[in-house]
Image: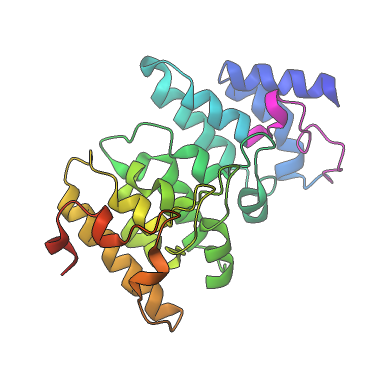
Amino acid sequence: GSEMCIRDRNAIDSCDYAKIDNLLNDYNENLKEIKSDSFIRCRNFPNGASILMYSLRKIINCENYELQNKINFFTYLLSFENIFSLDDILDDISTDERETLLIASLKIEPMENIENDIPHLLIQILLKSDTSEKEIENFVCQSDVHQKHLGHYIAQYPALLPLIGKYIDWKQKDNVGQPAYLSALRSYDMKDYNNFIEEVTKSVIEWCIRKNEWFDDKDMLDSKGNTIWHAVRDPSTLD
């Protein structure tokens, strides 16, 4: 198992398509049974990462000149759909930071064409499947080691808002007692802050409608009692 993990790790490090084909094709095309101790399921990568998480982190930590090549390679791994199923993508959580693949992918600098970005790709896989709304909600609201979920990090990739903003629990608080909505409102360094806040607020309203709940700003207090009106830069944005 560990020897195979090392081979697989070397293939990922070098973006070696031929090696990956050799390692995975039997499982993907011939539907060879993937046992629980298989290198495909192993967590012997650094920090207990899976193959997909390890490959994703190689993108996060790479030099700019390597970026597109490593993104293409991660996308290629996802094409082995008989190996990396939707459940594998949804349930892949790192053992150190407790990050989903989606949360980890937000650390990658967005490309000019968002359709080539990993966050967009992962969400499209999710939305094009027969996944229930509850499963989508559970995925985007999965908390990391800091009790933050996608809503707390949405300023890193606001293009996801129109796609899945209505599934985000904007009341959910992180480990310092800050609701996701307040976290977004405090993203003061956003290039287009006002439009961003309008999009977030629209998503908050859509989420309330989905959950059949009234919007109450008292539900959005942080641990110090600050409200959305304290957090937003320009209160008229929320009108």
Q: Quadrant of residue 138?
A: bottom right
Residue at (77% x, 48% y) in the render: 31
The image position of residue 136, as x and y in percent, is 53, 64
Is residue 75 rendered to the left or right of residue 86? left
Q: Is 48 or 2 nearer to us in this picture?
A: 48
The image position of residue 89, as x and y in percent, is 61, 49
Above or below, 129 relative to 64: below
Q: Is residue 132 visible?
A: no
Q: Specify the farthest residue to the front.
A: 224
Residue at (39% x, 64% y) in the render: 220
Residue at (27% x, 64% y) in the render: 201
Verify whether residue 50 appears in magenta. yes
Verify whether residue 144 appears in magenta. no
Is residue 72 rendered to the left or right of residue 238? right
Is residue 228 rendered to the left or right of residue 218? left
Q: Quadrant of residue 4?
A: top right
Dominant secondary-structure state across the stretch colored magenta = loop
Tell me where the magenta segment starts and ends, as one range. Answer: 33-52
Residue at (71% x, 34% y) in the render: 24
The image position of residue 218, as x and y in percent, is 38, 71
The image position of residue 53, as x and y in percent, is 61, 35
